[in-house]
Each structure stands twice: as structure tokens, then as C-alpha cells.
Amino acid sequence: MSDRALITGITGQDGSYLAEHLLREGYEVYGLARWTSTSNEDRIEHIRDDLNLLTGDLADQPSLDRAVEAADPDEVYHLGALSFVPESFTQPTVTSNVTGLGTTRMLEAIRKYDPEIRFYQAGTSEMFGNAPDERQSIDTGFYPRSPYGVSKLYAHWMTVNYREAHGMYATNGILFNHESPRRGTQFVTRKITRAAARIAVGEQDELRLGNLNAKRDWGHARDYVKAMHLMLQQDEPDDYVVGTGEHHTVRECAQIAFDEVGLEWEEYVKVDEKFFRAAEVDALQADPSRAKRKLEWEPTTTFDEMIREMVQKDLAAVRSDD
Ligand code: NAP
Ligand code: G4F
């Protein structure tokens, strides 16, 4: 009998890549998707017939209980969240409820149904925030700078607590930024690659951005979902930091994206105060040595390759809209 996995947030960037990966690995894949008035299934349309979708909301315990029971999974990958940092300042209590308490609800649903189910929590480098260390490892202290980061830190410790209190196989993956052509269009890399493509074909005049000096450790989502899967295949549950170990500025991202379409970024990018954050995380850079050693995981795509791939996909999309 094949292994069964339940993915919350299956309609998101990571959910779609993880579903593809698990299907390739021979899993029967279930996904929790919330009800929406129009379809939110664009990213999984190509594999829709191979998936078992269940409706539910992370704010609603009964729907989560039902989803766990219906999927009867061996592994749960909990990726569902309100994941856009600026919006978490606008909607702090929804963020706390969905991103924070939603994790407790999933852990409770599992504990009640079958505490042997393995659980992955989608942790984030945003929990490090104003980190004291130049490179962040599992030993770095946490200092989140947004309602999103605070909610994820709560979820992180709940995951540790269910492991220690109930003996559950509950694992935190602390993932640094990862992107792809499926990234939401408000996140800075995709905002840039899409704008570069649109400007190149004359559909947009300029690109307004916030802090160009912010540094992030950006990898490719396709690589990072493999690390999630590996984490749940270990003998014992543990917590892992996953990133490339390199960081780049938003400015560098713009340089590469505009170079890919043969344009000078300075001619099109304008700094707009509107996109500065109430509290910024200036720089994040992973120390992924433990994940590399214990999981034998390596990123395969460079930052430059990824941004160019995203621009090419955005160019193809804008051209096909014509
Ligand atoms: P994403 O594209 O924003 O996907 C988030 C998913 O959560 C979507 O499927 C969304 O559904 C779902 N969701 C939101 N609110 C929900 C609710 N109330 N009930 C049920 N589902 C809900 O995020 P991502 O980039 O794939 O990231 C996956 C996870 O990893 C998130 O938890 C994120 O916080 C975390 N993470 C991401 C990164 C990164 O760089 N990408 C790094 C570290 C951690 P809809 O499609 O209906 O909106
Ligand atoms: O792309 P971002 O919005 O991603 P951010 O805030 O780092 O969060 C992402 O990565 C986290 C992992 O560390 C995830 F947990 C989280 O769910 C999400 O996926 O912004 C990156 C940087 C920030 O410093 C921001 O201030 O880019 C800077 N930036 C500059 N101009 C901008 C813009 N960000 C956005 N979204 N839009 C701008 O115009």
C-alpha cells in the first residue's frame, strides 16, 4: 500500500511543488484547500486529477478533524498560512488565528485521530528577524519583527511541545526565502521578474519598490520541498534550517531580472515609501550545514538561474496573453 500524505496549503507555491514531488515518490496525496468563490487551483491544475482535495479552513477545527480522518495520512505537511509579511501588520489577529493557532488545531486533530502521524511545520527565517548572528542556525536566538513572524514562532514552539509532551513525530523546518515562477505576485522577486517582463513588452512603465538594501537568502521552491520530505523520513523528529547559505540584495535581484530582458534596472525602478515596512528584517542568511549533513540535502539552482527562469516564465505568460 502506498504512503498517504495530507498537505495543508496545497494551492500555494510550496503546496503545488510538494504535491508533484510526493506523487513522483508514489504517495497518495490529499490536500486541504479552503472554499473560495472563484477557483484558487491554478498552481495544481496540471495534477488536479491525481489529487484528493478536501475543503477546510485552518480557523475551523471541525473541518480539520474531518480532513485528517478522511485522508488517514501517514504524513501531514502543514503549509497553510497567511504568508505575506506586510499583510500580517494589517491583519494581525487573522494572522495569529490562521498562521499561529491553525498549527495547534492541526496538531490537535492529529493527536486525537492518530498521534503516530508524522507532522511537518512550515517554519520560517522570519522567526530570526533581528538575529544576533550573521548566519542563522538552529542555535540562533529568535527575534521576530512582524505579526507573521510572531505567529510562526508560536507555531514553532507548539510543534516542539507536542513532540515533547505527547511523543509525536513533529518536525520544524525553518526555511529561508524560496521562490519560483509560481511565487505570489506581491512577493518581491516575482514582483520584479513580472515587472521586468511587462516593461520589456511595453505593458508597464516603471516598477515601485521599497527597501532595495534588504538582503535575503533566496533559493528555489522546487529544491526546498525535497528537504521537507526528507525531514519526515528520518528516524527521529528534529528541527532543521534550510537555505543556500548565500544572501543577495533586492537591488541585485532587480539587476539580474532587467539584464535578462536587456534593460538597465535604474531606468525603471523607483523607490516608494509605501513599500517600506513598519519593522524591517534587514538581512537573513542561513547556516544550513546541519540539514546538509543530516538530510544530505543540497540546493541545485543558483539565485541568478532562478531569477532568470522566473523572468522567462513571466515573459512567456505576458506574450501568451496578447
Ligand atoms: P503561499 O503561496 O502563500 O500559500 C499559502 C497557502 O495557505 C495557500 O494554499 C493558501 O490558500 C493557504 N491558506 C491561507 N489561509 C488559509 C486558511 N485560513 N485555511 C486554509 N488554508 C489557508 O505560501 P508558500 O510560499 O507556498 O509557503 C508555504 C508555507 O511555508 C507557508 O506556511 C509559509 O508561511 C511558509 N514559508 C514560506 C517561505 C517562502 O519563502 N515561500 C519561507 C518560509 C516559510 P489560498 O490559495 O486559498 O490562498
Ligand atoms: O518578498 P518579500 O515580501 O518576502 P519576506 O518578507 O522576506 O517573506 C517571505 O519569506 C519568508 C522567509 O523568510 C516567509 F516566511 C514569508 O512567508 C515570505 O514568503 O520581501 C523580501 C524583502 C523584504 O525585506 C522587503 O522589505 O524585500 C523587501 N522589499 C523591497 N521592496 C519588498 C519590496 N518586498 C515586497 N513584498 N514588495 C516590495 O515592493
Image (spheres, grey):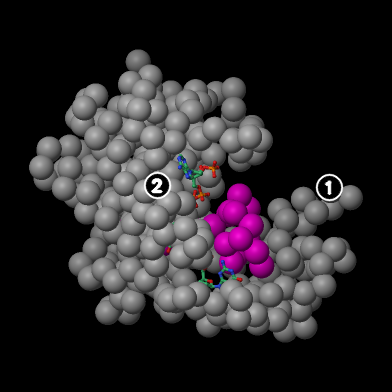
Which quadrant holds the N terminus?
top left
Give the image location of residue 229, x and y in percent.
36, 41
Q: Please say whether residue 115 is one of the residues in the magenta stretch.
A: no
Q: Amino acid at mark 2?
A: Val
Along the viewing direction, whichever of 124 and 95 lies nearer the viewer: 95
| Residue where numbered disc 2 is placed | 98
From this viewpoint, is residue 58 visible?
yes
Above or below — where is 75 with respect to 80? above
1 and 2 marks in contact (CB < 8 Å): no
Where does the magenta region start and end?
174-192
The structure residue drawn at horizontal position 89% and vertical position 50%, both measured from the top left corner, is: 322
Q: Please say whether residue 190 is one of the residues in the magenta stretch.
A: yes
Q: Secondary structure at mark 2?
A: helix
Q: Secondary structure at mark 1?
A: helix
The structure residue drawn at horizontal position 71% and vertical position 61%, both measured from the top left corner, is: 194
Q: Is mark 1 within 8 Å of ligand 1?
A: no
Above or below — where is 58 with respect to 320? above
Give the image location of residue 108, x and y in percent.
24, 35
Above or below — where is 174 with respect to 280? above
Give the image location of residue 241, x and y in percent.
31, 59
Q: Amino acid at mark 1?
A: Ser
From this viewpoint, is residue 233 visible?
no
Q: How many marks?
A: 2
Q: Quadrant of residue 132?
A: bottom left
Q: Quadrant of residue 288?
A: bottom left
Along the viewing direction, whichever of 195 and 108 lies nearer the viewer: 108
Q: Is mark 2 within 8 Å of ligand 1?
A: yes
| Residue where numbered disc 1 is placed | 320
Along the viewing direction, whichever of 40 and 25 lies nearer the viewer: 40
Q: Quadrant of residue 110?
A: top left
The structure residue drawn at horizontal position 26% and vertical position 59%, both measured from the top left corner, is: 290
First in residue order: circle 1 vs circle 2: 2
